[in-house]
Amino acid sequence: MRWLAFLLAAPAAADPIFEPVDMPPHIYTGGWEHFVGGGLAVLDCDGDTLPELVAAGGESPMTLLRNRGGMRFEPGAFPEITGATGAYPIDLDADGALDLVVLRVGPNVTLRGDGACGFAPHDFGIPDGGDAWTTAFSATWEDDGRPTLAFGNYVDRADPDGPFGTCDTNLLLRPEGEDWSRTVLDPGFCALSALFSDEDRDGAPTLRLSNDRHYYVRGGAEQVWSLSESRFLGPEDGTYAPSIWGMGIASRDVTGDGRPDLALTSMGDQLLLLSDDGGHAPAPYEVGATATRPHTGGDGRPSTGWHAAWGDVDNDGDADLFYAKGNVDQMPGMAMEDPNNLLLNEGGRFREVGAAAGIASTHRGRGAALADLDGDGRLDLAVVNRRAPLEVWRNVSEAGNAVSVELHQPGGNARAVGAWVEVRTEARVQTQEVTIGGGHAGGTAVPLHFGLGDAERAELRVRWPGGDWSDWKAAAPGRVTLRR
């Protein structure tokens, strides 16, 4: 019955429209070790409320693109880092300035931000991962101190029997005094995305790993690790863990039950998992989120999905779904002209609008982000491409109102990772969780965006990490900053 309610049609509205933005040059390059990766970090590194872009370059250097307003970007000073597969923004030292965790083929790098978009190498005491091929990252806070970190590794390059069937193990780091306790998550099944999330809303986050069947071949699956029990969860725990060519994770409550639903990218079908009796189950096919084959160009071969992102691009109150698409390189069984998808959520059914919206690029898309880059209340789009220039599109749709919510609190978890925010209008209640991780090799540290439709006012409340719900607070469309 819950799915039936989810599938009710919503009122028709104008389809979204995006316009391309002229950008400084950046291309994600490299051989087979950079067939995957190409992540994008989005963060406001200078405090002007306009987020910057930090793009992994593979064999090329990473690029920082400073946001100068009006969708004008220019290259900024940044350490010379090659071999990077991705990057995630995080405030590691709780000084209010966002830092960066850079994933690499080889030793990872952590960069300390100075609050003025300056970044310098600083290890924070975090092990660099050695020569691993790191392709996934997530972070959470289990207390008021330092974060718990997860690093997902791909193929073990040192195994002479590789690459097939030689997936590397993954690493969980938990703060222990001034050091870290290290838990090797074994077996590893070639993780390409990782996400800490309180999926069942019991107050304890779990770590989800999305794994690439192309290299584990058989005997593997998606994985969920319990922090509280220090073990992988299985079917006996209600965990649905299919074997897919997992590339990316996107998490958001789209059914309205207050629990996160999951979009998992893959080769062939993209998998939408709806929350169900405390766990997850595949969405009915008629929901329309599988995006199995190219929607333009007539290539009938299966698609290859990479980054997934939820975002209400028309601000109608229903979260829409973006998939970055692109062939691994020259894989003949998969579509070569593989356009990105923009699936408009119409009351629980998804309709493809990518071509009409102007974002159906057929470059080899990898990491991406939906974020309000110009501060106008509409979500814009950026995509890193393999062997093709980074692309950015400005959202110029006739969209509804929106409210953006940013959280701050004292202590080590300064940006309230793990908090839940609810926004209520007469039409609905929307729920989002503050997380670090997911996507494909990159993530955002921007305010949570809620579309309000034609509502001129809303109410919001916060469940802070380790705390109870706050009282409802009136909010007008625009940007809201809440402090604990």
Image (tube, helix red, strand yellow):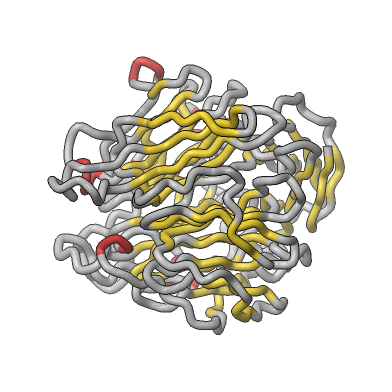
Report the side of 203 relative to 217 (left or right): right
Give the quarter of the image for residue 303. Answer: bottom left
Residue 422 image position (x, y, % from top left): 71, 38
Residue at point 62% right, 49% down?
A: 90
Number of numbered tags placed on the structure image: 0
Residue 147 image position (x, y, % from top left): 61, 37
Above-or-below relation of 249 to 22 = above
Give the quarter of the image for residue 327. Answer: bottom left
Above-or-below relation of 413 to 90 = above
Residue 450 can be seen, yes or no: no
Looking at the picture, tell me which residue is in the foreground, 154 or 396.
154
Report the side of 433 relative to 320 (left or right): right
Report the side of 358 relative to 78 (left or right): left
Looking at the picture, tell me which residue is in the foreground, 324 or 210.
210
Residue 409 image position (x, y, % from top left): 79, 39
Residue 51 image position (x, y, % from top left): 67, 65
Looking at the picture, tell me which residue is in the foreground, 353 or 462.
462
Residue 292 can be seen, yes or no: yes
Above-or-below relation of 353 to 8 = below
Residue at point 57% right, 50% down?
A: 123
Residue at point 47% right, 48% down?
A: 128
Residue at point 41% right, 73% down?
A: 60
Report the side of 177 relative to 269 (left or right): right
Looking at the picture, tell me which residue is in the foreground, 342 or 165.
165
Query: Which quadrant is home to the C terminus?
Result: top right
